[in-house]
Image (cartoon, rainbow, N blue to C red):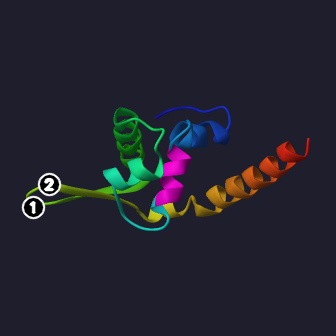
């Protein structure tokens, strides 16, 4: 079991980085395939997207749904634990909007 000096350390370990919160926000609107996420985030590389999705899945925030069909089909969705991040993500978005407004007025 990992030890943390502050609870925020645990949160940042799970959602830290440039892409994880963005992925979680896109999944709030429903299941997405990898290619859909790539189109929504054109600056992310395939390698980074795959890595971030695996980490979010390993941390228990998203589900990976693999369909038994040809060609293979995989979707990602927020699970209940991941949905518990919604209030935090909403606050981050609101803060970001205010920051953009403040930056544009300077």
SS under mark 2: loop
Q: Specify few, some or many for label 2: CA neighbours under 10 Å numbering under 14, 14-19, or 20 or more.
A: few
Q: Which residue is mark 2?
A: 72
Q: Does residue 4 appear left or right of residue 77 in this picture? A: right
User: Is residue 11 something that shows in the picture?
Assistant: yes
Q: Residue sitting at 39 percent across and 47 percent down?
A: 38
Name the spot of residue 78 as percent of width and height, x first.
42, 61
- Of all residues, the one furthest to the left in this rendering is 70
Question: Can you give x and y, in whole percent of width and height, for residue 80 in the image?
Answer: 45, 65
As helix, strand or loop, the secondary structure at mark 1 comes to loop
The boundaries of the magenta stretch are 20-26
Is residue 23 one of those drawn in magenta? yes
Q: Give percent across and percent down for residue 73.
A: 19, 57
Circle 1 residue: 69
**Magenta stretch: residue 91 in it?**
no
Position in image of residue 14 (x %, y %)? 51, 42
Disc 1 to disc 2: CB gap under 8 Å = yes
4 vs 33, left or right, is right
Residue 60 visible? The answer is no
Q: Which residue is at the front of the view, 40 or 10?
A: 40
The image quadrant that residue 61 belongs to is bottom left
At horizontal 50% and vertical 32% (from top left) the residue drawn is: 2
Q: How many marks?
A: 2
Residue at the (47%, 47%) spot, across then down = 41
The crowding category of the residue bearing disc 1, from other C-alpha atoms within 10 Å (few below 14, some 14 to 19, many at least 20), is few
* Above or below: residue 58 compared with residue 48: below
Q: Quadrant of residue 93?
A: bottom right
Identify whether 39 is placed above or below 55.
below
């Amino acid at each position: 079991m990992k030890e943390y000096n502050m609870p925020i350390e645990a949160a940042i370990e799970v959602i830290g980085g440039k892409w994880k919160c963005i992925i979680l926000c896109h999944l709030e609107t429903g299941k997405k395939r990898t290619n859909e996420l790539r189109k929504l985030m054109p600056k992310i590389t395939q390698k980074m997207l795959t890595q971030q999705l695996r980490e979010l899945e390993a941390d228990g925030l998203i589900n990976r749904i693999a369909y038994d069909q040809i060609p293979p089909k995989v979707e990602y969705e927020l699970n209940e634990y991941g949905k518990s991040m919604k209030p935090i993500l909403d606050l981050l978005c609101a803060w970001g909007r205010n920051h953009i407004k403040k930056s544009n007025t300077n």
